[in-house]
Amino acid sequence: MNARHLLAVVAATLAALGGSLFAASPASSAERVRHQDVRQLRESGKILPMEEILGRARAAQPGQIVEVELEREDGRYVYEVKVIDDADKMHRLELDAGSGEVLRRKTR
């Protein structure tokens, strides 16, 4: 499966779940990554494949993934992953896009 097809599959899956792959974020110190740059970042090894990020997010917080954003924060790429658990609580995980390490988590 090539990168374009994988990205389309993930976007379609998340859209079906009611989320989006790269959603707008409020003004902050984080800078959204343009979708045109995602392939280059992946091919250069600066970010992990989406399927690995999704797997790590699910391992850290079981539930339904409803949104994923890729941003550049303080010089590094970060995925923000929103997950709804079985108790309908929303979990926001921030994962380092290069290593997959969970940097922060917040529950509402």
Image (spheres, grey):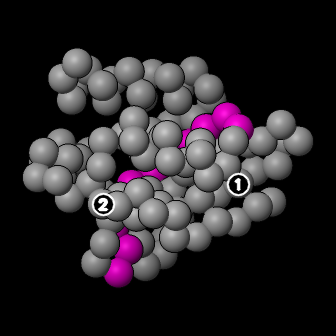
Name the residue rendered at 17%, 53% in the picture. Answer: 45
Image vertical order of residue 4 relative to residue 83, above or below: above
Residue 65, image quadrant: top right
Amino acid type of disc 1?
A: His
- Labels 2 & 1 near each other (Cβ < 8 A): no
Is most of the magenta stretch helix, strand or loop? strand
Say left or right for 65 vs 4.
right
Can you see residue 82?
Answer: no
Left or right: 8 in relation to 87: left
> Which mark, by number, is residue 44?
none
Q: Residues within 10 Å of mark 2 (few under 14, many from 20)?
A: some
Q: Which residue is mark 1?
A: 91
How far is the residue under mark 2 from the one under mark 1?
21 Å
Q: Quadrant of the C terminus?
A: bottom right
Residue 63: x and y in percent read 70, 38
Q: Earlier in the sequence, mark 2 or mark 1?
A: 1
